[in-house]
Image (cartoon, rainbow, N blue to C red):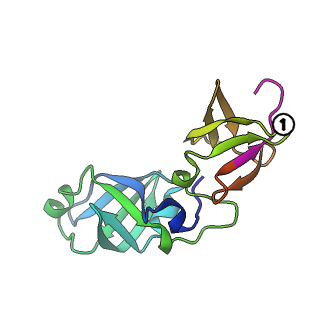
Amino acid sequence: MISSTDAANMGKDLLEAGVIVNTHGLRGEVRILPWADSPEFVAKQKCLYVDGAPITVVSARVHKSSVIAVLEGIGDIDSAIKLKNKTVSIDRSEVLLDEGQYFIADLIGLRVIDAHTGDTLGILEDVMSRPANDVYIVKGEREILIPAVDEFVLETSISGGYIKVRLIEGL
């Protein structure tokens, strides 16, 4: 799940949000494959960054699992094709997320602590997005997969550098 924190915590203002996978039509629209919880998240952004440069989003709509966008200054297929395979980013300061949501980039590297014992289980190495919920991949003495749901994830503290989890038998 994507969510926010203070930019000072990560020192990274731009977060990768997807990739331009192709053009759409002849008028310069681009098809973006989003790397977010939903294509709607990317479609509602007013500005995207390509190669670190801001580009105003003139319009955007969701089409299946991608976003079809008209970007300022891109008015024909020749201009749009030059953006193919480019990563699009968002400025974290322009995004307001609901409480309990975090940018995945802010979660990676946090210590994962067993809430019952206080032991460090490992470091959050990656987050797998699955249809039902995200799954945290924790690497320590062994790899642990933890569903990112309230039953297992009890507390997340970006500023504290940890995630407290409740494990069950077999996890």
Q: Position of residue 121 (x, y in %)?
A: 70, 34
Q: Mark 1: which amino acid? A: Thr
Taking the spot 21% from the left edge, 74% from the top edge, the residue there is 73
Q: Position of residue 11 (x, y in %)?
A: 46, 62
Taking the spot 75% from the left edge, 46% from the top edge, the residue there is 164
Q: Where is 129 relative to 49, above or below?
A: above
**Does the rendering let one see residue 37?**
no
Q: Quadrant of residue 114?
A: top right
The C terminus, quarter of image:
top right
Mark 1: secondary structure: loop
Q: Nearer the viewer, residue 1 or 162?
A: 162
Q: As drawn, which residue projects farthest toward the right? A: 116
Residue 88 within the segment the image draws in magenta = no
Q: Nearer the viewer, residue 26 or 59?
A: 59
Q: Nearer the viewer, residue 57 or 156?
A: 156
Q: Quadrant of residue 123?
A: top right
Bounds of the magenta segment = 163-171
Q: Main secondary structure of the magenta part?
A: loop
Q: Position of residue 2 (x, y in %)?
A: 57, 56
Pointer 1: what residue?
117
Residue 167 within the segment the image draws in magenta = yes
